[in-house]
Amino acid sequence: MNRQGTGAVWKRRLVTLIAGSVMVCSLSACVPVMMAGGAVSGSMAATDRRTLGAQTEDKVILLKGENTASNLVGDKGHVNVTSFNRKVLLTGEVQSEAMKQAVGNAIAQIENVESVVNELAIAAPSSYTSRSNDAMITGKVAASFVDDKQLFSQSLKTVTERGTVYLMGCVTEAEGNRAARVASGVSGVQRVVKVFEYISEQELQRLSTLSAPKNTEENAPDKIGQ
């Protein structure tokens, strides 16, 4: 097997391991970074188009958001909070439209939150089986993104709720459309909702330049004969 083929195999194994970890955690009720209040989200964190400041703020928003939602809803619902580049996605289930609006308004007041996408459903909390199935769907979508060589999988975050896949990330419009097509082709996916922050091709080029390795003495190729 050539080097490129070997790399692809290892990528698939890594994503399979991640998906398995998410599945095990959902079954044992543990809450890793990739899970928010029961919703399953997946992203390759090695490279991120967000600034370090935005990444830090997203973590704080997540913690404050989960605490706020828990205080408002208690055991009368199930609210998942996902923050990406200060945009907050709310998924899960609540008892009434009034509760849905109350949660959305409270989350919007959290410091550094720029916008809220309120996808809370007026329904009973999702079942154990439904959440386990969502974990498997997220793993399969993540694997599909890695397999697609035209997608930069590290820039995508996936949240799955009751078979609906929500896609977040800083992407160009072309990248977002392609990611949605790929996700919609994964078995078990009932609907795909794009919650992207779009950037221009020029901005993408700038970010790519910033993330490219610099040709320093430490990583420069050896010069023979000197």
Image (cartoon, grey):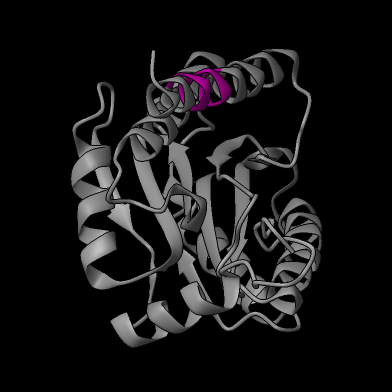
Residue 94 seen: no
In the rendered image, residue 142, in percent from the top left (x then y), is placed at 44, 35
Q: Left or right of 167: which side holds 104?
A: right
Q: From what the image shows, is residue 10 above or below residue 93?
A: above
Q: Which residues are magenta?
A: 9-16
Query: In front here: 191 or 20?
Result: 20
Residue at the spot 36% in from the left edge and 40% down from the top edge: 145
In the rendered image, residue 54, in percent from the top left (x then y), is placed at 69, 76
Q: Left or right of 14: which side holds 76?
A: right
In the rendered image, residue 34, in percent from the top left (x then y), is placed at 66, 40
In the rendered image, residue 121, in percent from the top left (x then y), is placed at 42, 48
Count of numbered marks: 0
Residue 18 seen: yes
**For residue 117, which quarter of the picture?**
bottom left
Indicate whether residue 17 is drawn in magenta: no
Residue at the spot 73% in from the left edge and 72% down from the top edge: 216
Query: In front here: 216 or 168?
Result: 216
Q: Left or right of 180: which side holds 92?
A: right
Q: Quadrant of the N terminus?
A: top left
